[in-house]
Image (cartoon, helix red, strand yellow):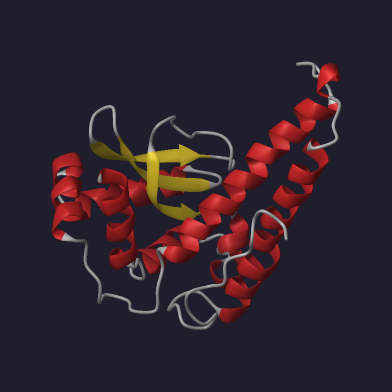
């Protein structure tokens, strides 16, 4: 059995308002599955790569390690993205503990979402909302690629994919409308669970 397994969507592909079944099918079943499969392929190749030839200009080992990071982050960020959306638009709310931290970090939930959407508009790949232990606050980080823009020690609790594959079929180049629709289907129960795990 491969070390990394594809996670099924926690809802039907047509269940999330504002994101079509076709968009969800391509995004989850092809793009996300591709990252999981490539990560497994790289892990297998690393077992037999000649580490004695490792070099910073080029080596097979270096190339595999770079792509290991890219595919691992592609897998992890997508799993968080799918997990923290849901069909119950407007039903869930942040837990008391999460809301307190959001208000401490941004002043209000409205300010937090405004900042997160602005980061997403500015990003070419991802907006990642993460708990940052060095100051004990939530920050919204920008990542143009899966493996760029991460902050060591910060733990993501919510992500939004803003690569064009996540919205172009439904919204064309109107990323702003996609983000407005996405913000309405955040599953705050799941985000709150992630926050609780991070802070325990």
Q: Residue at x 40, y 39 (%)?
A: 141
Front residue of 42/63: it is 42
Q: Residue at x 53, y 73 (%)?
A: 9
Front residue of 127/177: it is 127
Q: Is residue 181 above or below residue 105?
A: below
Give left or right: position of 59 versus 35: right
Q: Residue furthest front?
A: 1
In percent of width and height, residue 95 lies at: 19, 61
Which picture quadrant has residue 104? top left
Q: Residue at x 62, y 60 (%)?
A: 165
Q: How many marks?
A: 0
Give left or right: position of 20 versus 137: right
In percent of width and height, residue 49 lies at: 85, 31
In percent of width and height, residue 102 lies at: 20, 48
Q: Is residue 48 visible?
A: yes
Q: Residue at x 50, y 74 (%)?
A: 19
Front residue of 95/41: it is 41
Q: Is residue 175 visible?
A: no
Q: Is residue 62 above or below residue 38?
A: above
Front residue of 3/14: it is 3
The N terminus: image quadrant? bottom right
Give left or right: position of 153 versus 125: left
Give left or right: position of 179 versus 59: left
In percent of width and height, residue 60 lies at: 84, 29
Which picture quadrant has residue 99? bottom left
């Amino acid at each position: 059995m491969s070390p990394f397994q594809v996670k099924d969507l926690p809802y039907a592909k047509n269940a999330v308002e504002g994101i079509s079944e076709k968009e969800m099918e391509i995004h989850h079943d092809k793009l996300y599955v591709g990252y999981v499969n490539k990560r497994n392929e790289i892990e297998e190749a690393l077992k037999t790569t000649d580490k004695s030839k490792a070099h910073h200009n080029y080596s097979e080992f270096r190339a595999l390690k770079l792509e290991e990071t890219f595919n691992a982050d592609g897998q992890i960020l997508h799993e968080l993205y799918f997990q923290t959306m849901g069909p119950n638009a407007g039903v869930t709310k942040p837990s008391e503990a999460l809301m307190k931290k959001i208000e401490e970090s941004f002043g209000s939930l409205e300010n937090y979402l405004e900042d997160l959407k602005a980061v997403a508009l500015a990003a070419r790949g991802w907006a990642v909302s993460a708990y940052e232990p060095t100051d004990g606050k939530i920050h919204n980080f920008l990542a143009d690629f899966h493996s760029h823009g991460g902050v060591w020690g910060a733990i993501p609790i919510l992500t939004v994919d803003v690569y064009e594959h996540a919205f172009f079929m439904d919204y064309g180049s109107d990323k702003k409308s996609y983000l407005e629709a996405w913000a309405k289907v955040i599953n705050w129960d799941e985000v709150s669970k992630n926050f609780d795990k991070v802070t325990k």
